[in-house]
């Protein structure tokens, strides 16, 4: 059974800092891994999707890496802004039709 | 291109009542998954529908049931509501495992 852990649980940084969010998962037999952002009380917005054959994906100031064999992914946010404040969730997609499994996420606060 | 649409956005029900939540998937998606998210927790998988059949189910009681229509839209029904059913209910659509999931904005259910 897939289990997902995200560290740290919460993070507060001053504006402009570069930061790294960590995601670990127990079953490395995955098709892909998706990073999401969730604002309070809202739905999930997909940020990046990394296929199992890829090592990393980039979108603007975001870069996600995947080390499938070690069961780890990191989300790097460059030059953080107050608008980046949200909860970030990672979800590995297992093979077949198994649905996404989530951890509790990392709650990020970027202070102006 | 419309994403995933959920209705209603907010709902207040009394213990013991029944509720129906609705979801229209993203255009081109044929699979719908439902998740329950309690405050401060990651989303928990309820069930997934494909070709109008329940394909996967999480650890939720039979009070939670669903349906998928020929146009791929879906409903989540919860009977005999409990206070503990108060949560954000998220619908996600997908089409094949390698293309990621798209989530709706959620329905906030409050049971009083």
Image: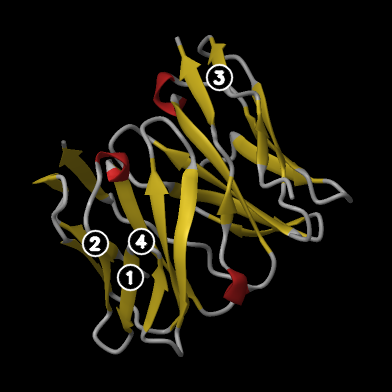
Q: Is disc 1 in the same subunit as disc 3? A: no
Q: Chain of mark 1?
A: A
Residue, disc 2: A78
Query: What residue is shown at x 43% (from left), y 48% (from top)?
Result: B44
How crowded pointer 4 is (Cα within 10 Å; few <14, some 14-19, many 20+) is rated as many
Where, by quadrant of the figure, is residue A17 drawn? bottom left
Q: Is disc 4 in the same subunit as disc 2? A: yes
Q: Tell me how far mark 3 sits from mark 2, CA to CA.
A: 35 Å
Residue A74 vs residue B45, the one in the foreground: A74
Q: Is disc 2 in the same subunit as disc 1? A: yes
Query: What residue is shown at x 50% (from left), y 53% (from top)?
Result: B58
Q: Is residue A35 left or right of residue B77?
A: left
Q: Is disc 4 in the same subunit as disc 3? A: no
Which numbered mark, 4 or 1, is in the foreground of this view?
1
Query: What residue is shown at x 48% (from left), y 56% (from top)?
Result: A46
Quadrant where the C terminus of chain B is found in the figure: top left
Q: Chain of mark 4?
A: A
Q: Is disc 4 in the same subunit as disc 1? A: yes
| Residue A11 placement (x, y as % from top left) | 13, 47
Q: Is residue A102 above or below residue B9?
A: below
Disc on res. A90: 4
Res A32 seen here:
yes
Q: Is residue A21 left or right of residue A33?
A: left
Which numbered mark, 2 or 1, is in the foreground of this view?
2
């Amino acid at each position: 059974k897939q289990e997902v852990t995200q560290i740290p649980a919460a993070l507060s940084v001053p504006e402009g800092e570069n930061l790294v969010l960590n995601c670990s998962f127990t079953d490395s037999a995955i098709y892909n891994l998706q990073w999401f952002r969730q604002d309070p009380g809202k739905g999930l917005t997909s940020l990046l999707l990394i296929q199992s054959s890829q090592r990393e994906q980039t979108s603007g100031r975001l870069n996600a890496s995947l080390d499938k064999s070690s069961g780890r992914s990191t989300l790097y946010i460059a030059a953080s802004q107050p608008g980046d404040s949200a909860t970030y969730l990672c979800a590995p997609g297992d093979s077949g039709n198994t649905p996404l499994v989530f951890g509790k996420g990392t709650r990020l606060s970027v202070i102006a | 291109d419309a994403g995933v649409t959920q209705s209603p956005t907010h709902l207040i029900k009394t213990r013991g009542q029944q509720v129906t939540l609705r979801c229209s998937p993203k255009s081109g998606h044929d699979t719908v998954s439902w998740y329950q998210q309690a405050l401060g927790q990651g989303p928990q998988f309820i069930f997934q529908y494909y070709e109008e059949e329940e394909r996967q189910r999480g650890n939720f009681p039979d009070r939670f049931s669903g349906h998928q229509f020929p146009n791929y839209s879906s409903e989540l029904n919860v009977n005999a509501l409990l206070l503990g059913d108060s949560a954000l209910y998220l619908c996600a659509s997908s089409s094949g495992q390698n293309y990621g999931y798209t989530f709706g904005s959620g329905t906030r259910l409050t049971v009083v």
